[in-house]
Amino acid sequence: MAVAEPQLRTLTPEQVDQFHIDGYLAVHDLLDADEVADLAERADLIAAGKADHIPETSIQLERVFREGEREVENQVLSVRKLFNLAVYDDLLWGHVTNPKIVDVIADLMGTDDIKLYGDQLFMKPPEIGAAQDWHQDSASWRDILPMDLVTAWTSIDHATTDNGCLNFAPGTHRWGMLTRPRLEPLLPDLGTDEWPVRAAPLGPGSVSFHHSLVLHQSNANTSGNRRRGYATHFMRASSYKDEEVTDAPKMPPFKQVRGRSFPGRV
């Protein structure tokens, strides 16, 4: 008996296949200009410390300011990232649950039973925005199983090779979860003919979706332009949280995005 193909909501079968092959997929111009402007305004409000509903612990400065190498002159342009925001902020929760985003997540996961794992808003300020090394998200989130979370990385500004757009090593999500000692010997192969690296430049309102095991990184922002991107991390509502893993990030309670919840699961 033939098994019916799942009904896709917004992507083509070719796009879903490409995601499964590469571990990431870019969808351009997914959000409109007003939606992007709302994200940009809220990002700067929170980074400025003027959003009383967001705890100070959700704001992280760039290393040069955290370690006192430079003095903060402009609070907003000193912030590296903001995190765990949507559980406190209605506008950002509206972005998390935006059908334009969630329909793609549902297509890529093959389910409508979805929860939010967490969120991060990367500010990457001009000239001082630090690089992010090669990593797999699930190497940090190793208490969540199966390791097939999907991140929607929404570009607020133009993300370019000059200001630190994401770079992916396609296909590396099929390597499994790698601890740092196991990953280190493989890093010299990235960017070679054997394991090419692809940049993923995006315009405002475009979104890249990536598997939680695909290797990715971003270079430093050496340009005079900002590179803000809002990353929302989604998982199956049927996922299992391994309570014996004690060194994974401590997250706020997981919120239902769409579909069913399951007793004893996340």
Image (cartoon, helix red, strand yellow):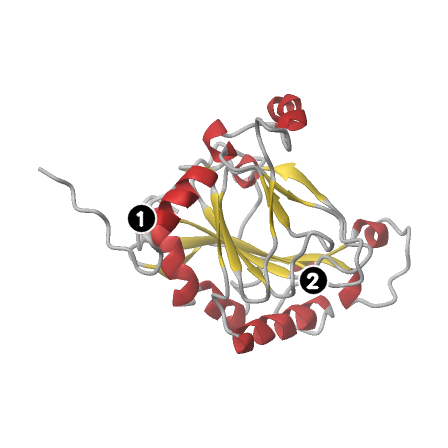
The amino acid type, in three-letter code, at marker 1 is: Gly
Would you identify the image quadrant in which residue 242 lies? Answer: top left
User: Callout 2 environment at 10 Å: few (<14), some (14 to 19), or many (20+)?
Assistant: few
Judge from the rendering whether residue 216 lies leftward or rightward of residue 65; answer left or right: left
User: Is residue 25 in sight in this rendering?
Assistant: yes
Label 2 element class: helix
Residue 4 in percent (x, y) is at: 17, 46
Residue at label 1?
110
Q: Which residue lies furthest to the bottom in this view?
A: 34
Residue at label 2?
56
Q: Which of marks 1 and 2 is in front?
A: 1
Q: Residue furthest front?
A: 193
The amino acid type, in three-letter code, at marker 2 is: Glu
Would you identify the image quadrant in which residue 223 lies? Answer: bottom right
**As rendered, which of 193 and 145 lies closer to the eye?**
193
Looking at the picture, does residue 105 appear above or below residue 100?
above
Judge from the rendering whether residue 26 lies leftward or rightward of residue 260; answer left or right: right
Residue 124 in percent (x, y) is at: 72, 57
User: Callout 1 environment at 10 Å: few (<14), some (14 to 19), or many (20+)?
Assistant: some
Q: Which of marks 1 and 2 is nearer the N terminus?
A: 2
Q: Quadrant of the N terminus?
A: top left
